[in-house]
Each structure stands twice: as structure tokens, then as C-alpha cells.
Amino acid sequence: FIPALRNHHGSSVADQTSHQRCVLSIALLTISDSRTLDTDPSGDLLQERLLGAGHHLHSRAICPDDRYRIRAAVSQWIVDPTIDVVITSGGTGLTGRDGSPEAISPLLDKTIDGFGELFRVLSFQTIGTSSLQSRCLAGVANGTFLFVLPGSQDAVTTAWDRLIAAQLNTETQPCNLAQLRSRLKESQDKPAN
């Protein structure tokens, strides 16, 4: 059980924006040497959840577990201004073929450290100490949110249902990631308006 936290950092983003629901454009990438779009239950689950939340599926693809091909696929999406969020599943373990974190980390402008920390806490509730093997992460690259998830259905369910869905919902209080979208590419040289 994690208690709700209050924002004690002055005015929140929630105070500055309306509570209008926004539709985000999301790209899904399954990282697997064996899955296809027809045999990808975790990708199916993420697609169902994001559409059910009222978001738009921009693209969905499968990529082999090769760090350079993963990086190339994700790079194409983070330079596309019509994509708000990229979610990958798979390749976060410890085997020699698991390279999603190494592929995506160099692309990030900022990391969202709390995502991986909270994911492992939540996973511990169902899989115990095996959760320490998860190397999931999240961050921002070129104004696009990225979530790098393990490939199991349990993992993507935990990530979407307990973390991502709420943070991509502008109604989540006291703050959420969706409300930050317009400010992600602010210049560090210019003060915010």
C-alpha cells in the first residue's frame, strides 16, 4: 500500500491548467525475437488499454532484441511531432539478448526515476524479490514520453493500470505527466511564461 502524496512544492501544474481530458497519440513497440503482431498478448493488452482510456494508437510494431534496431525504431518515433508517448515492452531482463534499457537510455533528455522505483515496489507485491530483475525505466526525449516495460502480461498490466494510465490522464491530481506536454521542450535559456 502506497499512501497518496500531497504536493508541497508551491503551485502545481494542476492549478495552471484546465481539467479537460486530452487524447494522446501513443506508439507501441514490442521487443522480441519470437513474437509477431499475431502472437503478442502484451502488445494487445497495451493497445486495448490505451484505446479504452480514449487515447489514439499512432503505430504498433515488433522489433528484434537488438539495441541498434530498437534505438532506430524509437528514434523515428521521438522525432515525429504527432507522437506524444512511446511505450516499449520486452528486453528489460538480464540475459545477453535483453538490451532495451541500453538502447533507449542514450536517447533520453531526462529520466523519470520514480517510474522504475514505483514499478518495482508494485511488482514486489506479486512477484516478490524477482522484481529486482526488472530494469524498466521512463523518461522524456524530444518532448515525447517514453516508458520501457518488461514484456510479460503481468508487467504491462501493472505498469499501465497502476502507473501510466493515471499519469496520462489530465484529471489525475495533484499533477500528471499529460499536463506537462506543452512545457517539455521549453528552452533552458528562456523563463517559463
Image: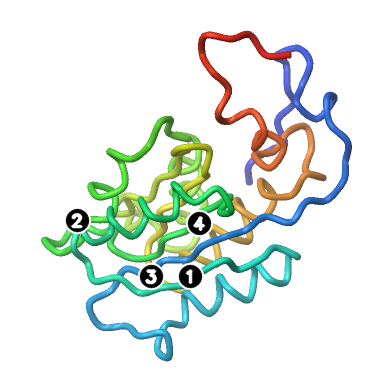
User: Which residue of the protein is positioned furthest toward the left in this rendering?
Assistant: 96
Task: Say which residue label 3 marks.
Answer: 30
Residue 55's image quarter?
bottom right
In screen coordinates, is 91 left or right of 188?
Answer: left
Q: Are marks 3 and 4 in contact (CB under 8 Å)?
A: no
Q: CA distance from mark 2 to mark 3?
A: 15 Å
Q: Amino acid at mark 4?
A: Gln
Residue 116: x and y, percent? 43, 43
The chosen color scheme is rainbow
Task: Say which residue label 1 marks.
Answer: 154
Q: CA distance from mark 4 to mark 1?
A: 12 Å
- Who comes first in sequence, dot 2 or dot 3? 3
Please state which of residues 77 and 136 is positioned toward the viewer in this rendering.
Answer: 77
Q: Amino acid at mark 3?
A: Thr
Q: Which label was assigned to residue 125?
A: 4
Question: Residue sitting at 74 percent across and 49 percent down?
Answer: 169
